[in-house]
Amino acid sequence: MRLPRVHIDTESLIANYRTMQGLAPASVCGAVVKANAYGLGVTPVVPLLAGAGCSLFYVASLDEGVAVRRLLQDHGFLTPEIVVFHGYLAEEIPVYKQHGIIPVLKTPQALSSWFSGDYGPAVVEWDTGMHRCGLPPALAEEVSRLDPKRLHHIMTHLAAADDPDHPLNAEQKECFEGIARLFPHAPTSMGASHGVLLGPEYHGTYVRIGIALYGGVAHPDLRPVVQVRAPILEVRSIAAGESVGYGASYVAPCPRQIMTVGFGYADGYLRSFSNVGQALIQAKDGTCFDLPVVGRVSMDVTTLDVSDLSASVMSEAHEVVFYHPHQGGIIDAAHRAGTIPYELLTGLKPTLARWVGVEGR
């Protein structure tokens, strides 16, 4: 099969979950698996995390929640809780009840409607400074009169947790702590992946771990999880002055060897990697060779400069690797493309095959 494959290192995924658990030992460590588990695929990821002890999953929509519930049941995991960030529509309430899924309530209308019926527990989100969604703090005293047994937990989302020195972190924490004092019996949730790294005062009863699970946070104890392996389609020689790809954006300064591989923007490899991205070939002895992207990334192919590879390495190669740990994985790749690891991962198309196992074995 001459198609790119997403390689998921299961050992590293589970190790990252346990690392984050270790960094928040007083909290329940929930896994965020929205957007198809950040592009890796819920089918391999959710059962692995449940098997590692994860008892709480966060998703964006009810459809995602139902899919995760069924997947968990199919693998014999009957007790994990599922929380839907985007709340509910009135017509969805029977589905929430049927599958035991918990909505996040963000507006006074949603709060009033949900708590007026016997619909089970809910999460209430507070806007402490993100100004994206959530109830305003001014409503906290009024909401605190609701039945506390119906509150699964209260939560907020930190807007600048990836910048530890940003003053908004402390401002949001202080605001949320003020709200939480009005809910003395309600569990809390403040920290997502970067929030956990800010320290215990940013955690809460529950922490919500997303990008850190998948290798997108720079931390000495977190491992890369994802690589993409793409087939070599062709190698050709070009002369000095000849160009490569659409728009002739790369012109060879001297004779070069150009490799075309089967991985492009239709697969999730961003066009912004044109002339700045890199891939890698690993020889049989383990030696790694960096291959710069030359020319524009196309819909389903990318071109690489392989002029410095020896004939023996070229003869052995049948695929190249993108986002290899030797090159900084998705974190350094995102920096090269002027984006964030989240976009690289969630951009990996569901149509790509997933290889699941321990990388290097």
Image (cartoon, helix red, strand yellow):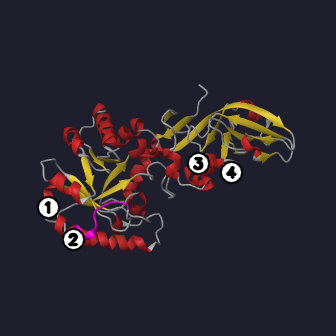
Disc 2 versus disc 4: distance between alpha carbons?
50 Å
Disc 1 versus disc 3: distance between alpha carbons?
50 Å
Q: Point out the stretch of residues depicted in magenta.
A: 132-139
Residue 179 percent location from the top left of the image? 25, 69
Whether residue 361 can be seen here: no
Disc 1 versus disc 2: distance between alpha carbons?
15 Å
Element marked by disc 3 = helix
Q: Which tag, 3 or 4, sits closer to the chain's start? A: 4
Question: Does residue 96 sit above or below 353 in this rendering?
Answer: below
Question: Does residue 258 sit above or below 215 in this rendering?
Answer: above
Residues packed near mark 3 inside 10 Å, few (<14), some (14 to 19) or many (20 plus): some
Element marked by disc 1 = loop
Question: Does residue 194 sit above or below 266 in this rendering?
Answer: below
Q: Are marks 3 and 2 in contact (CB under 8 Å)?
A: no
Q: Residue drawn 16% across and 48% down? A: 120
| Residue designated by label 2 | 181
| Residue designated by label 1 | 146
| Residue designated by label 3 | 325
Residues packed near mark 1 inside 10 Å, few (<14), some (14 to 19) or many (20 plus): some
